[in-house]
Amino acid sequence: MNLTQRYRPSLALLTDMYQLTMAQGYWKNNRAEQEAVFHLYFRKNPFNGGYTIAAGLEEAMDLINHFSFTPEDLAYLRNLRGSKGQPLFGEGFLNYLSNLTFTCQVEAMPEGTLVFPNEPLLRITGPILQCQLLETPLLTILNFQTLIATKAARIIDAAQDDQVIEFGMRRAQGPDGALSAARAAFIGGVGATSNVLAGQLFNIPV
């Protein structure tokens, strides 16, 4: 089961308010379709290590491939008000979002690839408004799963020939953190997980 099936048909609101206000700014200034390139990268390896393991791409692409604003999403945005009671988003912009279709090109490191600082894990090329809306969800998906996959790989290196099993659900950041971490740890090389739902959803030995 993929990301959008687990939660809801639309994850377009899985972003920061900042990204939506930026998008409206582009639209108001007739810059929504301006070509842009966004790179997702990191500046140093986690844990003071020598490498990082890329993870999260499959779920990121699932979000992108199903990216759209539902009538419920737009109704919620329509009801948001600023500090003086004015609508935060204009009807013209909301109409633009209702017809928005993702047209960007994506290039990315395959999951499980060794990556290094200042080397893009993912590059998006396309209209700046679309790139802006995707910035936050891509960061939250790829950053977390890459961190967990890297930690798993380091533990496996330290364990040498001993089997390593992922057992983090009790301390994870909620149900999604537990599922995402189990998946990422498996990409990082663990042999099994204690998380039975993750075993069912991702075909990981339990």
Image (cartoon, rainbow, N blue to C red):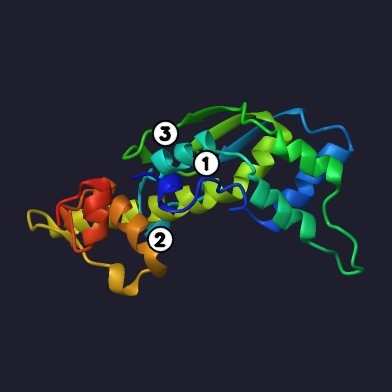
Write the residue at 90% across / 62% down.
86
Write the residue at 83% across / 38% down.
27
Q: State left or right for residue 33 relative to residue 125.
A: right
Q: In terms of secondary structure, where does tag 3 sit?
A: loop
Please name the residue that numbered disc 3 is placed on.
109
Marks 1 and 3, how far apart at CA? 13 Å
Image position of 169 with respect to 182: above or below: below
Q: Amino acid at mark 2?
A: Asp
In this rendering, which labeled residue sits more in front, label 2 or label 3?
2
| Res 113 visible | yes
Q: Earlier in the sequence, mark 2 or mark 3?
A: 3
Image position of 171 with respect to 80: above or below: below
Disc assigned to residue 176: 2
Front residue of this view, candidates 55 and 93: 93
Please name the residue that numbered disc 1 is placed on.
118
In this rendering, which labeled residue sits more in front, label 1 or label 3?
3
Q: Earlier in the sequence, mark 1 or mark 3?
A: 3
User: Label 1 neighbourhood size at 10 Å, few (<14), some (14-19), many (20+)?
Assistant: few
Q: In terms of secondary structure, where does tag 2 sit?
A: helix
Disc assigned to residue 17: none
Write the residue at 40% across / 45% down.
56
Front residue of this view, candidates 20 and 146: 20
* Residue 199 placement (x, y as % from top left): 21, 53
* Residue 12 placement (x, y as % from top left): 60, 47
**The C terminus appears in which quarter of the rendering?**
bottom left
Contact (CB < 8 A) between labels 1 and 2? no
Quadrant for residue 164, please give it.
Answer: bottom left
Front residue of this view, candidates 57 and 3: 3
* Residue 205 placement (x, y as % from top left): 15, 52
Q: In terms of secondary structure, where does tag 1 sit?
A: loop
Q: Amino acid at mark 1?
A: Asn
